[in-house]
Amino acid sequence: MDSRLRTACEERLALLNLPHRFGTGQLCDAVAAWCGKPLIPRPLDTTGFVDAPSGVSIETDEAFFLFYERGTSRLHRLHILAHGISHVLCGQIGSLPWEDGLVPAPRLQPEFGACISGRTRYATADERGAEMMATLIRQRIYRGRQFPTWRPTVTEDCWERRSLTLLDPLWQDLTRVLPHIALDAGADDELDFLLHRKVIEINDGILALRPHRSRAVQHAAAEAVAARQLAGTAEGDAIIEAAILAAALHAAHSESKPDFDPAPPAPGTRDRAGDLRTETTWLRQVSDAYTTDPIVHSVRLMAAIHAPAGK
């Protein structure tokens, strides 16, 4: 990615004069004061929609309504919200066509003159800019927790490098099948920035695969996990999630019909702490199972055997 985009985002973010340590609430208040309208976050449920945006930003005469997908991890929800805030800060709302039923707010129908943007893919400069801004916002929030200054320690540096390596197999397969989830970060060498991008893109991939999450695969994997006495453990949950993702990736690649009664998110998805380390730790377990576990390998083989001819 052009370094000029990052510089432009950093300069615009600096206009808010945020303190070194701030949270999402303070950010919303600062942007509201800057643009003269309140920012109102709202959860969004896109279950049953294919290729739905994970976030929707709507501007009316009175306020900005920022809808974020509720069926994902806390870290992912906060990032989606930051993306919507970034659209407001950059004055870029208005590119998404209306889809009835997507946003649960009848009074915000198009005839009221609402401007709408959605977080779907990064094909436009507006979306790339908002996603870059959101990543910088979340990076600053993480670093602000290391008050008063942030400096990476040797231990943190090693952990982040190791995490990037361990997440790579799952990330590679997700972005190969779903290339639209990847934001070109260019030659950025800040490990926390790169790790955040990889974690967000994996979460985006998991969400995009939701129409292909098979309950049959979930049940079969759960039985196999129970046979190994891993039921109810983090390791067992990661194996089941990895098996679901392996089958879902194959279904998406094969252009199979979506399942409108998909398997639910992994246990604890919505309740995990919203920090980068917690989310990374979970995804490391999933990626490890995805790469090495025999249950996942069996699911992958079965998916290949039952694939439609020519796929």
Image (cartoon, rainbow, N blue to C red):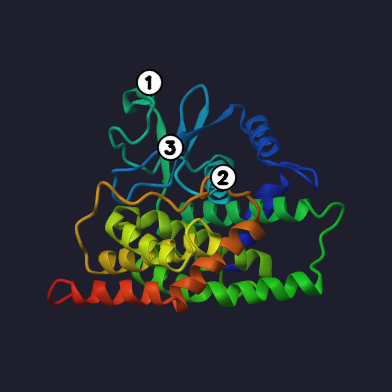
Decide which of tag 2 and tag 1 comes sooner along the chain.
1
Measure the alpha-carbon separation of dots 2 and 1.
Answer: 31 Å
Pointer 2 with pointer 1, Cβ within 8 A: no
Residue linked to disc 3: 44
- Which amino acid does the dot numbered 3 rest on? Leu
What residue do we see at 47% from left, 76% from top? 169
Instruction: Mark 2: give few (<14), some (14-19) or many (20+) Cα within 10 Å.
Output: few
- The disc, 2 or 3, on the residue closer to the chain's N-terminal end is 3
Q: Residue at x 57, y 41 (%)?
A: 85
Label 1 environment density (alpha carbons within 10 Å; few <14, some 14–19, many ≥20): few
Q: Are marks 3 and 1 in contact (CB under 8 Å)?
A: no
Residue 222 seen: yes
Residue pointed to by mark 2: 271
At mark 3, the secondary structure is: strand
Q: Which residue is mark 1?
A: 107
| Lower position in the chain sequence, tag 3 or tag 1 | 3
Position of residue 212 in the picture relative to residue 104 (left or right): left
Rendering coords of residue 9 (x, y %) = 63, 54
Q: Of 74 and 178, which appears nearest the observer?
A: 74
The quarter of the picture where residue 23 lies is top right
- Considering the numbered disc 2 on the image, is that residue within a helix, a strand or a loop? loop
Q: Nearer the viewer, mark 2 or mark 1?
A: 2
- Residue 80 lies, in percent from the top left, at 52, 47
The picture places residue 87, in percent across and down from the top left corner, at 52, 44
